[in-house]
Image (cartoon, rainbow, N blue to C red):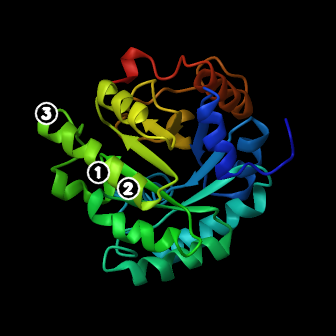
Amino acid sequence: MSDKRITLTDLHQLKRDGGKIAMLTGYDASFATLLENAGVDSILVGDSLGNVLQGHDTTLPVTLADMVYHVACVARGAKRAFLIGDLPFGSYQENAGQAFRSAVQLMAAGAHMVKIEGGAAFAPTTEFLVTRGIPVCAHLGLTPQSVHQLGGFRVQGKTVDGARLLLEDARALERAGAGLIVLEAIPAKLAADVTATLSIPTIGIGAGRDCAGQVLVLHDLLGVFPGKKAKFVRNFMDGATSIQQAVENYVRAVKDGSLPGPEHSF
């Protein structure tokens, strides 16, 4: 494994070469080092920390200060992986200027890219950030910050109109300059269509095996989160003798295309 820092350009090349991107969430320095030693390409410092670290029912209580702290922790432990930091609820929705000020804090803490939830309505914000040197990862499908508007943690894009809208959103965000798009909890066929349509990589979580990469929440992968398990979750500690081996098994499954299987897809 090379010690060279993985860049967004490398992730784009990986998609063009037909390879798969292995991403996991991470929240501290020790796990960041373990994840990249196990072969993870990218670490998402997700606002999922609100659930798995802070014990909240949703990600809504997570603050920008929380995210800055955990991005800085991960950045100190990861020397090779590409780091993405979530912009939390309320830190970017008001206007592009607010999003820029929030993103600057995450980038200064060590992020290489920021993630924004939402569709074409956030294309202008995405373009504003990208033209000012801040790479953006979009997030479509089940967007946890909108859980109350969506009526719960439900699969998105199941109807003809819903699928069409999601594909239009993806195209708009790519045109605005998004460098990656996370697709969460959508039908595998729709995710495959989006992936084939876009030139940028898609990262699936509950979106089938045809995405350019996969991401899971670390605590779900390790089977330590006590909450309800989503259909797309697989416990990689089963049969593993260590956490590092479990993460290595995850990376191998992503790279060879065996994750997710049909049982983990919609």
Whole-percent x and y of residue 77? 77, 57
Labelled disc at residue 169: 1
Report the amino acid beneath label 3: Val
Which residue matches tag 2?
173
- Residue 125: quarter of image: bottom left
- Whether residue 211 is visible: yes
- Residue drawn at x 62%, y 49% as measured from the top left: 43
- In the displayed structure, 255 sits above or below 23; it is above
Q: Secondary structure at mark 1?
A: helix
**Mark 3 or mark 2: whose residue is earlier in sequence:** 3
Q: Is residue 234 above or below residue 69?
A: above
Q: Which residue is mark 3?
A: 160
| Circles 1 and 2 in contact, beta carbons < 8 Å | yes
Check disc 1 and give the amino acid type. Asp
Q: Secondary structure at mark 3?
A: helix
Amino acid carrying mark 2 in the image = Leu
